Amino acid sequence: MVAADWPGVDPEWSREIDVPSTAAADGPGTVRRWHLLDNGAQLSRRGITPAGTLLCVHGNPTWSYLWRTLLAAGSDPARPWRVVAVDQLDMGFSERTGTFRRLEDRITDLGDLTAALGLDGPAVTVGHDWGGVISAGWALAHPQQLAGVVLTNTAVHQPVGSPIPPALRLALHPGVHRWGTTTSDAFLRVTHSLAHPPLAPEVRRAFMAPYRGAGRRTGVGNFVADIPVDASHPSFPALDRVAEGLRGLQVPVLMLWGPRDPIFSDRYLKDLVGRLPSAKVHRFEGAGHLVAEDRDIATPVFEWLTGCGLDNGAAAFPAGVSMAADSPAAASPSPESGTGLPPLWAPLTKLAAGPSGGDTAVAEMAADGRISRSLSWSELEHNVAALAAGLRQAGVRRGSRVSLMVPPGVDLTVVLYACLRLGAVVVVADAGLGTRGLSRAVKGATPDFLIGIDKALAAASVLGWPGRRISLRDLPAARRRLFSVETSLAALARRGQLQAGPTQAAQDPDQDPDPDAPAAVLFTSGSTGPAKGVLYTHRQLSAMRDTVAETLGIRAGARLVAGFAPFALLGPALGAVSVTPAMDVTAPRTLTARALADAAAAIDATVVFASPAALRNVLATQGGVGQAGREALERVELLLSAGAPVPASLLAEVQRLMPQASLHTPYGMTEALPVTDISLEQIRAAEADAAAGTVAGAGNGVCVGLPVHGARVAVIPLAADGTAPGNRPVTEAGVTGEILVSAPHVKEAYDRLWLTQRESVRTAGWHRTGDVGHFDAAGRLWVEGRLAHVVTAPGAAVTPVGAEQAIEHLDGVGLAAVVGVGPSGTQAVVAVVETVPPARRAGPAAPQLAGRVRDAARWAGVSVSAVLAVPSQPTDIRHNAKIDRTRLSRWASAVLAGGRAGTP
């Protein structure tokens, strides 16, 4: 097989070079023959001067072919880089040396090669698998040439007491090693099978090409044998030297990771991030060990080179010299915004020390309608401080990630504020993500500690969630061993209280955490793809608290019923009494009217927060509310509902249940909550303006009102292909585009999603929300849907929400979704409607219903090609309201192509 037979490789890149060896494995005067893929001569022939060199090092059992996309990208005259992809000795098409080469030899080998090539920088190393360690070793040995480091699915350290991955343990077993790695090609085939999606047959053949025959696979077996399983291994000192050396690296670093990797899992990424905290990190959800095959890595690598200024031909670029455009701080609205904010727990401390210290601060309800547990402000302050002291003794430190898997209520409130006060980073991934989504989120966040109820601890044991485990309550010894639990919150609280004495628990001996230090990783709902971790600093959480207080007038002394889990945690920060009603917090639609009324009566509530799905069930079950409960609801002053569009008709029904309440529907997202706010009266006024046509731009979407206190909102105009390619924010009436927000409480960054973060802040000073909408002449924002759900019909981009609203006004129709079917640019508009009562089976709608749906959509300016009916729409778990339009589009495509309808 020759270079012409390698898909994606220009034969001109393939070359060989003789290199004098200085490795300990070779004798004096030894010369080794290397094979490379190198575009340097090609660039030179074209008269192109590259900005620098990418030195790409494969792992085991791949070869330089792994880097073909980087070679192609580096050959682009618009951004030329020399790319030297090596075949390590005994690997690929390089010489079979007949020697056993250890890690130290391979690092030396690479240095010998670059010396023979005359490579003098600026150089950026790119490594995968054990090539990551070797390239990092070269980087540390050549600081004058080094300009940057790229790492993909690799490891530089094996945690003490932690076994190596099972696949490698099997490959090292004496009864398997030689046969599995050398005699047969099993190790290669298993590695190639880790690609997601599977490798094309011709690509698989190219990867196998250098390893035909046992004599060509000796290096594969030796590579496996050289894995330092513990400190006694001959290569351990070299590995340890590389691992510790990385801590002092002063160049930009990029890590691109496939988390679906049975070998180099997220725990190895966590170790690397700890050594290189300034690195840009992107986890490609769904990608695995062969991340360079699973995803396009060339585009992010070259974007990173540009963002770091490395494409200017500059020499080494020390970390921290300048701020790249994707830096969260670069997107902050202004230096003065949010400065001097008191920490999130300041109201709690103040109330505990004042005359209200004995009043109820937080409570939770039992199914019988009575308060089952509660704490006063002084008790809450004491418990938080005691637990903080106990957690600190258990090893929780500033920056430690702590996953909280505790239902909303007293316990979650105490542990949340204890962690924040310590400076730990709380990871909040709720059960509303579903088992798969929750597992993906927890593994991606790589917490140091996991605190949970028994159900969460059992899941952690079965699903392999990371983190030292702490139970909520004291567990019997057998169960503690079963769940690998070290201690309990109850035990830590007792320990902290003993340390602090009977009257005041110990505070962190240091000052409060840095306002700009990470405080929390909160996860999106996962309704538009895998849930994303959203990183907030202490300053941003405090700004969120103050924005909510200023916008909605929630002050200390307010009494809050939180039917939506995340909002319950803001109660103490606002100085508000908070109670969690008896419900399944992972399913908002389980909130009944009686449970809501009981909670309201228990604290004489002034504020209620519930999702639209929860409100629908409250209305459906209001017959079960007694007189005392009705009177409690009638005293509510403010109702908040968010998470999905809230129809005015639904709010009007709720108004009858809470006649004294001002009904508000804040618009926002996990990344920025809230962004705008609107009341029922304002919704009615906006709808009247839209119907009368008296205000330009009114209509076609959900009116979400005006920007909240301290926020700015704008849009980037939508193009005909359904994208928002520009970077000039506008606020003119009637211009539909991607919605942007700038505010002190906007997130710091997406967690370990560098590409996603970069895209979200590419308009300087703004967060791009991924929602689409427009302003009317009164300055009100109208949301028209998600950018990803825009239908690209011939000659026009169709946003879904306006047509969906018109369809949902029809009798016999519940939720509606407008989706696109077919190739982008020529998509047909399909309406999928949930019928009332539910249809017996999903499929094409009855002709009469289809006609009415088409007429309603036409009134909204949308021409519908097909109408399908479903018993119920697929919605997200957290809100029970956000329709999965991407899933519906796939289903509709299959049905309209003649496939079996089934369940969407």
Image (cartoon, helix red, strand yellow):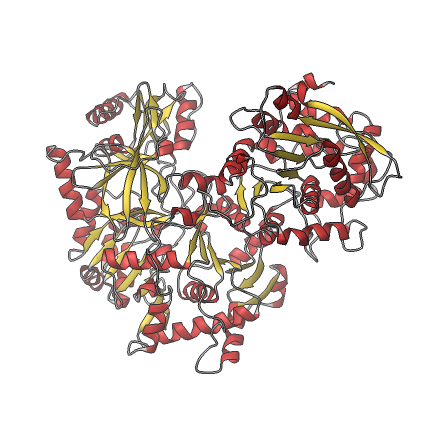
Q: Residue furthest top?
A: 4
Q: Residue at x 46, y 83 (%)?
A: 502
- Whether residue 558 is visible, yes or no, is yes
Q: Nearer the viewer, residue 461 or 708?
A: 708
Instruction: Tally the numbered discs.
Output: 0
Q: Residue at x 41, y 64 (%)?
A: 413
Which quadrant would the C terminus be assigned to in this image? top left
Specify the quadrant of the image occupied by residue 468: bottom right
Residue 495: where, in percent of width, then height?
54, 75
Q: Residue at x 32, y 53 (%)?
A: 591
- Using the image, determine if residue 294 lies above or below residue 760: above
Residue 370: where, in percent of width, then height?
32, 67
- Whether residue 171 is visible, yes or no, is no
Which quadrant would the N terminus be assigned to in this image? top right
Q: Is residue 466 left or right of residue 640?
A: right
Residue 802: where, in percent of width, then height?
24, 32
Q: Residue furthest bottom?
A: 502
- Using the image, determine if residue 841 lies above or below residue 269: above
Specify the quadrant of the image occupied by residue 211: top right
Q: Is residue 271 left or right of residue 241?
A: left
Residue 198: where, in percent of width, then height?
61, 28
Q: Nearer the viewer, residue 721 or 97?
A: 97
